[in-house]
Image: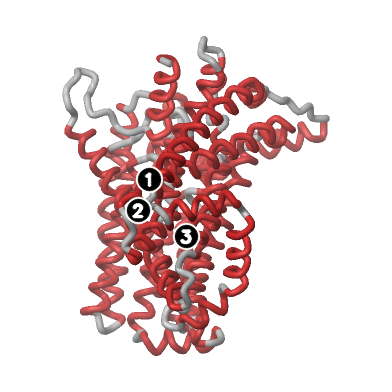
Amino acid sequence: MKNLIAVLRFYFSTFYALPALKDSQGKVSSKSVLKLLGIVVLAVYIGGSFGFLAWQLYANLYKVFASIGIQRLILVYALLYGSVYIILISFVSSFSTIYTNEMEAYLSTLPVRSSFLLTGKAAALAVPEFLFTLIIMGTAFIVYGMNEQAAWLFYINGVLILLLVTLLIVTISYCISIPLLAMGRIFRNRDVTMIVMGFIVMFGVLYLNTSINRILAFTEDPAKIISMLQASNETFLNLLDAFPPLQFIVKSLLDAANPVYVFLLFMILAAVLFLSFGVFTVLAPLYQRVIQGFSEQYIKKMNRAQSVSFLRTNTGRQSPLMALFLREFRSMNREPVYFLNGPFIIILLPVILGISLYFSMGDQGSLGEITTLARSNFTPVQQVLVSIVTGAFLGSATSITCTSLSRDAKHIGYIKTLPVSSSLYLGAKLIHGMLFGLIGCLVAAAVSIVLFQVDEPLVVLVLAASFVLTLLFNVLGLYIDTVNPQLRWENPVAAMKQNVNAVIMMLLEMLSLGALGFAGFMWVKDLGTLMLFLLALPLVITVVLLLLYFPLGIGTLRRLEV
């Protein structure tokens, strides 16, 4: 048991990488306290945002179902649809974290039972899965309980059901993931795995976004919602009558005042807990072989023509700046975690916003009518303002420059030994960020042409202003990551997704662009003033920051020790 607890602590500390409150001298660090407080505030904000969205969805569904006397169906919807999304999230999480880095192979050699290692990893993943379950399913339970004035045992039963669902789904996910990874070498290719899982998550998010927007778009017309969900309602009612486990769960909520259900749910939860540990014990040897398979190195023998082509492509003479830029570009795009959480956001965000716009304005008719409505609601200056702010956000939200030194933590010592100018090394990072920044600006310009039908001269102004703002934010990102690089990490997830610099930069972008947009809507009435504040002034600030950055960056790089 002591080994199991130690493994649990290890996985929780490595998966979530929370800052230690005490420094190496045993004193409480104010910097760590502020970091932890910021992480908690951000988690509460994100959870609250998703919770509010779920509340709106379930509250509207409850009103519609209550009007025809089938309000209990909201519980069935939450249980079934919620289970589908939790299964998707859990499967992706388990599949992509079976092997995170070389540390997994080292752990498998320690005198610790493999079942403990697998159980610890599953427990670490079960915590966020439970939080997702709480939002996706628990919100529906709260909406139903408050409207039906349910007994307090209703909420206890609800929590037990959420724990039971989470535990079952996590266990099933590993039962699928581990044998699948053991089946073939292609599944043990971490890059392929991350890309496939990333696209699965993307399509899942888009489908969820589409479903929610379809329902929320008809909140003022319950008849349309009833008509849209009629087939699902009939199917779920038939399933409720034919599937005893679902009957029992719904009955434990509808008849929650009966304490027998609390006892039965406790017993079932305990039984599933022991069963899960038994399953992990059975899967442990296969898990061990999968980990060893990830550690194997496969060498491809090339013929003469392939060797010549490889050497010509990869070892040809190039300028130092171009070589450094290509290194940045390839390292970002070669690592799926970096790409999916960085440049890919330029594609993902417009798609999500487009779906939301389509369903929120779907009653307006064709695309032409939607663009007419958009143009009538905004003045020409406001149309340009919205396009500029959108382009600046897309161009600077890739988290490239604000994690550039952090991502290079394993290579900085090597880079410093090369006869390469530090200014070129840092400049290549800025150019890399601005390449994708330009793509984000072009996407925003295209949206402005389609949505607002902005004229060509104004499109040039949109591109210029959004590019300058993008440059400003990318330079600020370099500042942040230069002053506070995150050099202690064990896997790419920690360098990118768990990097506090990316969070700081994202919040700074949102607050700054939100303030600029608000000020522009309130006080800017002509294009000249708009260009002064969104083009000329940011350009001057950017030039000054660039002149000050390179001496700072060169000095900091000289002092860095990894």
In 3D space, how far apart are the residues under numbered discs 3 and 2 (Cα atoms)? 24 Å
Q: Is 97 placed above or below 297 here?
A: below
Q: Quadrant of residue 4?
A: top left
Mark 3 or mark 2, earlier in chain: 2
Mark 1 or mark 2, earlier in chain: 2
Q: Position of residue 301 (x, y in %)?
A: 78, 27
Q: Quadrant of residue 142?
A: bottom left
Circle 1 residue: 259
Circle 3 residue: 75
Mark 3 or mark 1, earlier in chain: 3
For badge 1, the amino acid type reads: Pro
For badge 2, the amino acid type reads: Ile
Q: Dot 2 lies on which element?
A: helix
Q: Is 74 placed above or below 46 here?
A: below
Q: Position of residue 95 (x, y in %)?
A: 59, 38
In 3D space, how far apart are the residues under numbered discs 1 and 2 (Cα atoms)? 35 Å
Nearest-to-viewer mark from 3 and 1: 1
Residue 383 visible at all:
yes
Looking at the image, do the residues carrying marks 3 and 1 touch, with CB atoms under 8 Å apart?
no
Circle 2 residue: 46
Residue 321 visible at all:
no
For badge 3, the amino acid type reads: Leu
Q: Is 369 placed above or below 92 here?
A: below
Q: Position of residue 56 (x, y in %)?
A: 38, 67
Observer-nearest of 288 and 557: 288
